[in-house]
Amino acid sequence: MNRELQTERTQPRPSQTIDPAARTEIIVGVLLAMFLAALDQTIVAPALPTIGSALGNTEYLSWIVTAYLLTATAVTPLYGKLADIRGRRPVIFGAIGIFVAGSVISALAPSMLMLIIGRAIQGIGGGGLGALAMTVIGDVVPPRERGQYQGYISGMWGIASLAGPVVGGFLAHKFHWSMIFWINLPLAAVAIAVLNNPLKKLPPVRNDHRLDLIGASLVILATTSLMLVLTWGGSRYGWISFQILGLTFVSLVFWGLFGLRIYHCEEPILPIEVLKNPVVATATISNFFSMGVNLGLGVYIPLYLQGVRHLDPSSAGMSLVPLMLSMVCGAAFSGWMTTRLKHYKRVALIGVTIAAIALFALAVWASTLSYLGLEAVLMVIGVGVGTSFPLVIVCVQNAVDPSHLGVATGAATFLRALGGAMGVSILGTVFLSYGFAQNGQAAKGLSDLGPKGSAAFATIFLAAGIGLVITNVFLLLMEEKPLRGESAK
């Protein structure tokens, strides 16, 4: 194994063999491919009522979103290892192909069950696009310059978060709900056309490694059962119900078996040397909590704006624009500064600290702050949280051997996605603890949650602020290694 790694280290790095024009084409292509996955996490929501009316079985509407999230999160580590074994080009094209197949199945679905199956297949493809995009950027850009491109990735996610609800609602209302899936085909075709030739210039990888299918199966089963706990807990079943406790036990068993597997397998899907890397450990844990806060706020701030601030759904959605745009600006600024500062952690540490203080202030004045004041606070939160996203991936990729670039990026992306799901679930548990049942009657009353609603969201903002404090603790613990430049890559 060591001999193989030494051989790989002697090969020229992609950044040394790819000209700037091809590098730009590759980055544009992978960003477009990643946009497919990002857009599909937000474009479906406004079309759900229309889909329910057309297909029936409205009690399973939430599974249209959940099925995608389940499979996308579970397969992320698998793609990282596959990219290290088979090469970037065939794996990223395979992910796009699976995503397109799922989109076609979803668009043609005659029933709710078939639509859910199509969404699950979409997730299998979409789950790899984010990790593969960051891996390819890691291939062609030295760590010292990588923060700038990670800012572009955060910007792409921000654009998708803003465009998804608008495009989804427009297509479902003006045309047909299936158009939200058909639109993926031309986007995928453009991504493949842009990526096809430039990716051929990436140096070939060694193909004598083996894929740990048993480990991949265990992590998928463990993740899926955990995601079911987070999805069903407190809504479909009580947290201490037999179903939730049983699923928790099943998840723990699979995680335990997975832990044993990575210790005893010759080539595990997540190598021990990567997981034991202190920079990887602290960076991914930090990102776990920051993404939990990010996605949790994205779900519950619109509900806060409607239930406590009495805005209609359209106005509540527009009120999120400053938060999303400021988050993109924070990520772009952090990525830009990472390439120019020796002590590059300081931007994220300061930004996350300010965001945490803003959340604590919002918890105190959740019901009394003026609308303009609220928008200003949301912008501060967005900028602060955004500063942490580019830094983490850059540090992870900088800390590992280039031969483990794909699997390390996949692990970081996997834990980020899992953290986002857990953040939504934890904040949802806080909300439900105030007696708001998730049923039709409660949905009709979302426009006025009363004093209880103000108290619930004050606690939610407090919990989110604590999440950012934990984020900063692990950022502080993360070693600030010098970023490798072109020659050291």
Image (cartoon, helix red, strand yellow):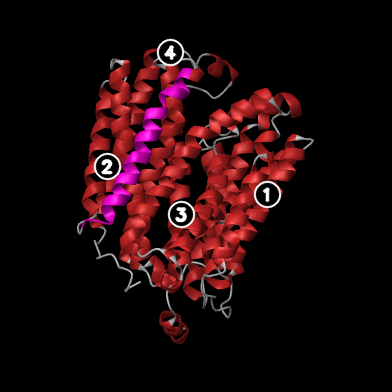
Instruction: Judge whether 151 appears above or below 210 on screen.
Output: above
Which label sits on residue 352? 2
At label 1, which amino acid type do we have? Val
| Rendered location of residue 361, percent (x, y) | 24, 27
Secondary element at tag 1: helix
Amino acid found under the numbered disc labelled 2:
Val
Task: Please name the residue shown 24% across and 61% down the image.
Answer: 480
Work out how far the residue at label 2 is from the one at label 3, CA to CA, in angstroms: 20 Å
Residue denoted by label 3 = 413
Is 382 located above or below residue 319 in the figure?
Answer: below
Does label 4 or label 1 sit earlier along the sequence?
Answer: 1
Type of residue at label 4? Answer: His
Which residue position is annotated with label 4?
310
Q: Earlier in the sequence, mark 2 or mark 1?
A: 1
Q: Report the quarter where the C terminus lies.
A: bottom left
- Lower position in the chain sequence, tag 2 or tag 3: 2
